[in-house]
Amino acid sequence: MFSIFLATISGVFVILSMITNANLAKRVGVFQSALVNYSMGLTGITILMIFFGNTQDLNFGYLTEIPIWAFGGGLVGAMIVASSNVVIPKIPALYTTLLFFVGQIIAGLTIDFFKFGNIPSMKLVGGSLVLAGMLYNIYVDQQNEKDNKKENDMEEAAAILEV
Amino acid sequence: MYKASATVIGMLIAIMVFFNGTLNTYLDSFTSGFLIHIVGITAVIIILIVRQEKLKISRDIPKYLLVGGLFGVMLVIFNSYCFVKIGATMTLTLGLFGQMIFSAIVDHFGLFGMTQNKMIPKKMFGFLIVTAGVLVMTIG
């Protein structure tokens, strides 16, 4: 239950960091924004470690027991920043969320299949519902945009006629 | 083509959570977060050197723009913790659910200097279906 709460709250953090990073990136560019981002994060986490005390026994022998790819998360993160920078401006914003979701669900289910050994059918049913809801809202947004455009056109036409 | 790339980025996000979560099974949350950030900084510095970017970071950047990294830390710690407990699919789905709700709130009220985009009542129906889907996934 606690994990469910934390996982949902982390979505709030995603949006908050996206907003601040996008604004920072306007000034210094995406990669320097990422550099500031990681540096601030590192500072924050160092302070946390000092405050709460570091309980981790860090000896080299133990570190070498960890599979090397498990250290790759930060690298993948940088790849995500770099590729998003190219891809996001090229596709409509409405699709970005949807396609990111599709990719995450496919990879997530695959990872869990290897972690837990099965893919529960409820996850597939629920995932399809999530997708359906997102598609519906994309449709509503598109209709709304069309209506707005029509309204603007009408106003423009009216303005021209008045002149 | 770009749409396929967006799907791949989604997969990369899942893989990142998987890597970070795995590291978290060997090390405590702070230590793994620390190492993840070190690797991230190194990767970004290499990118900056390859692109031969001139450093534009200066003192006149408003301080509130610097807090993004702190949200990032919470994100890494929360995600890794949840991955171990409830797996990749649920961590990611609930995260996206939180994103959807929170961004709707930000748009509706125009928070944090964003342009206000009032919620279209019709979209409540879509949100309801998404919520039902998330509930089914959580129970199942």
Image (tube, rainbow, N blue to C red):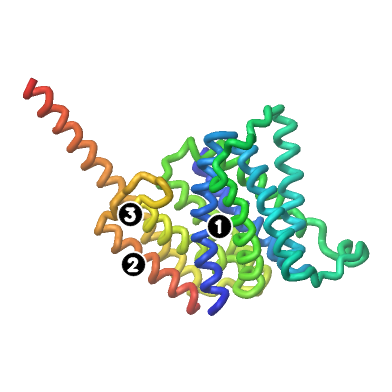
Q: Are circles 3 and 1 on residues that touch, CB within 8 Å?
A: no
Residue B13, how many percent across, how many down? 60, 54
- Residue A24: quarter of image: top right
Foreground tag (2 vs 1): 2
- Residue B84: quarter of image: bottom right
| Helix, strand or loop under label 1 | helix
Residue, x 56% and y 52% (percent of image)?
A: B10
Name the residue carrying label 3: B108
| Mark 2 nearby-residue class (10 Å; few <14, some 14–19, many ≥20) | some
Residue closest to the far top: A163
Residue nearest the observer in this picture, A62 or A126: A62
Residue A36, how many percent across, how many down? 65, 44
Name the residue type under label 3. His
Name the residue carrying label 2: B128
Foreground tag (2 vs 3): 3
Whether residue B25 appears in this view of the structure is no
Alpha-carbon span between mark 3 and mark 1: 26 Å
Do marks 3 and 1 share a chain?
no
- Residue A30: quarter of image: top right
Name the residue carrying label 1: A104
Q: Chain of mark 2?
A: B
| Helix, strand or loop under label 2 | helix
Q: Chain of mark 1?
A: A
Q: Are circles 2 and 1 on residues that touch, CB within 8 Å?
A: no
| Mark 1 nearby-residue class (10 Å; few <14, some 14–19, many ≥20) | many
> Relative to residue B57, is residue A135 drawn left or right?
left
